[in-house]
Amino acid sequence: RTNQPTGEYNHLLRSVIKYAQGLPLALKVLGAFLNNKSALEWEDVLEKIKKIPHRDIQDVLRTSFEGLDDLEREIFLDIACFFKGISKGYVTKILDGCGFFSHCGLRVLADRALITISDWNMVETHDLLQEMGREIVRQESVKEPGRRSRLWSSEDVTKVLTQNTATEVVEAIFIDFSKLKEVYMHAESFVRMRKLRLLKIHYNSGDDPSDDCKQHMIGDLKFLSHELRLLLWHGFPLKSLPNNFQPNNLVDLDMRYSLIEELWEGTKPLKKLNFINLSHCQYLNRIPDFSEAPNLERLNLEGCVSLLEVHPSISALRKLVFLSLKGCKELKSVSSSSIGMRSLKILNLSGCSCLEKFPEISVIMKELSELSLDDTAIKELPTSINNLTGLVTLNLRDCKKLEILPS
């Protein structure tokens, strides 16, 4: 056992403790490795393990991972690579969509102390365990990221997509384009990734991605994997998805701020689809037939300023709880069937400046608690609005043409 560290080691010791985050096993392994080394050697080691996790620590932590079955391993690697800090409810839906039996799997991972569920119901894992999971994936192909099952590093993803080095091994890609000025992607890369089940191209800034990064597609995008469960592509640079795209496995479709004019033609099987976000797609002029999407819960069309009408099939969405048409300035009418879903809890029509008439409510809607009609051209509210028996909030601010309210 050595003496107390001298002053030059104090800040390095704090860095070691911070890196280990109180994990006794990690402190023990690091302590043994750093013993009798100079301050300069400590700095080199600490810098190295930030980039490439320390092998002894990973080997010790990996014993818990190796005791898992195949599906439990898949769940852990997805969490380590992509879903740390994400709500358990959402993660469960995506993983179940992948056929991973997430409820059992998450329980096993928690029992093995590989993950925790926070008080806010978020899926969490220790930083060192996350590093272990990512290192397992990195070891699948150290020199060629296009041969790994999961990609999350901006450097690796841009290399794979711009140099067209993707392979069918790739199952999941998450990338934040916020820090990039411009990116060129080979359409052929997506043809090769036939097993791709999770695709997330996003911007952490949350603003219009055109202000951050210009996306360019090299060649025609003729194919997207039919295995996709998550298709989140902010700022999608094309007018529509490939004609042959089969979204029957999709759980979440999020293409906000895209150049898309329509998703696809006709009716597609959408039985697993829970969420659609097409907000701020300023060129979107129509939405598809949703009659084959019985499990859709949320539909966000906010800021779709070219949208002229809502497809009547929306009336068949018996599980829809959230519908936003906020800021759809060209929308002139909505039918009673389009908003008459008994399951609906929130309806936002604010900023629909051409909307002159609110439709009759032909059914009792007990669930609708929030209705926003502010800044519309509505002249009167029908007496049937009394059928909204669960209404808590009604926003009529800046309805300058409103003349008649029901008694």
Image (cartoon, rainbow, N blue to C red):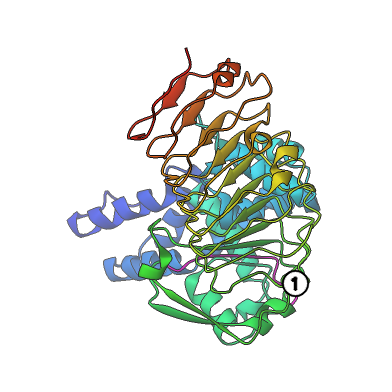
> Circle 1 sits on which residue?
243
Magenta residues span 168-177
Quarter where residue 384 is shown: top right
Please, is residue 398 above or below residue 93 in the view? above
Q: Disc count in the image?
A: 1
Nearest the eye: 92 or 33:
92
Residue type, numbered disc 1: Asn
Left or right for 403, reference 5: right
Q: Splitting the image into 4 quarters, where does residue 12 fall? A: bottom left
Instruction: Estimate the x, y position of residue 345 in percent, counting from the top left.
Output: 58, 28
Q: Report whether residue 123 is seen.
A: no
Residue 80 colored in magenta in the image:
no
x and y, in percent, of residue 220 in the image: 66, 84
Q: Residue furthest top?
A: 407
* Callout 1 secondary element: loop
- Residue 387, compared with residue 58, is above or below; it is above
Q: Nearer the viewer, residue 39 or 307?
A: 307
Residue drawn at x 39%, y 30% as measured from the top left: 402
Residue drawn 36% across the image and 49% down it: 18
Q: Is residue 95 visible?
A: yes
Q: Residue at x 68, y 84 (%)?
A: 188
Residue 236 x/y as whole percent: 55, 69
Please tell me how crowded label 1 is: few (under 14), some (14-19), or many (20+) other residues with Cα within 10 Å.
few
In this rendering, is residue 165 above or below 343? below
The residue nearer to you, when weighing 16 against 183, is 183
The residue lying at 81 percent from left, 54 percent from top is: 269
Question: Is residue 176 found inside the magenta-colored segment of the image?
Answer: yes
Left or right: where 259 falls relative to 387: left
